[in-house]
Image (cartoon, helix red, strand yellow):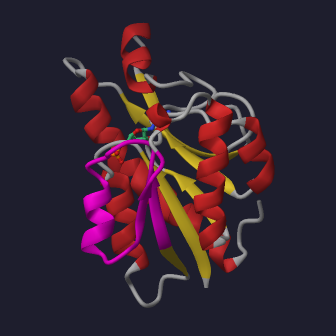
Amino acid sequence: MLTVAVLISGAGSNLRALLEAAAHPDFPARVIAVGADREADGLAHAEEFGIPTFTVAYSAFPSREAWGEELAEQLDAWKPDLIVLSGLMRLLPASLVARYAPRIINTHPAYLPEFPGAHGVRDALAAGVDSTGASVIVVDDGVDSGPLLAQERIPVLPGDTESTLHERIKPVERRLLIDVVRRIATGELTL
Ligand code: GAR
């Protein structure tokens, strides 16, 4: 059974989908802990599923490195086989990436390498493209620059706002994320 720790910053809707999938007895992975870099609403989903949570508030540390050291201590306590960044809106320090690489994956609401960064949906809309997408990647030292594990195109529709487009992207992200975690757990996909 593959053990998974998930890191979030926000609402955790993709986390919830993963928790629901992983609660199924046939799913080959289990979420063992959920962490956040702030008091994230999404931690409530983990609590509902009886999964332990932790918060390492970015604002409480003098530097990204110091925050990363405490985050690594928390993660080490769970010894996860895989770390999923599911809406974690912080870059991990290189030392933390190196400690777990290539076992950290990230979801992103764009068709990478198009529109990396914190505003993938907004940037796609601003560019006036007629399609964007959803991606799941391995985390490396860059900003959304690691190897692609899965991605899918999603059309931008006339009248789309950042919110309507993001809400159409998220179900695709969830499906891709759950499938990638399943394939890593079964050994179909090697990181
Ligand atoms: C997701 O769309 C995720 O891909 C994105 O934040 C959203 C989190 O939603 N992450 C990034 O943009 C990272 N660059 P959620 O909290 O409802 O799951």
Spot occupied by residue 30 in the image (x, y as percentages of width and height): 50, 78
Q: Which of these two is toward me, 65 or 184? A: 65
In the rendered image, residue 23 lying in the magenta stretch gets the answer no
Is residue 39 rendered magenta in the image?
A: yes
Q: In this view, does 64 lie above or below 5?
A: above
Residue bounds of the magenta highlight: 32-56
List x then y, in percent, for residue 104: 66, 53
Tell me which corner region of the image, top left, top right, bottom left or bottom right, holds residue 113.
Answer: top right
Quadrant including the C terminus:
bottom right
Going by the image, does 161 lie left or right of 24? left
Quadrant, the N terminus: bottom right
39 horizontally vs 68: left or right: left
Q: On the image, which quarter does residue 127 sit in?
A: top left
**Relative vertical location of residue 20 with respect to residue 163 in this rendering, above or below:** below
Q: Is residue 7 above or below residue 32?
A: above
Residue drawn at x 38%, y 84% is 24
Marker count (numbered) = 0
- If the picture is divided into quarters, which one holds ligand 1? top left
Q: Which residue lies furthest to the top in this view?
A: 127
Residue sitting at the far left = 159
| Residue 112 visible | yes
Q: Is 190 positioned to the left or the right of 71 in the image?
A: right
Residue plotted at (54% across, 64% down) = 5
186 or 49, which lies in front? 49
Is residue 144 visible in the rendered image? The answer is no
At x 38%, y 81%, the residue is 23
Image spot of residue 61 (x, y percent): 54, 34
Q: Residue furthest bottom?
A: 25
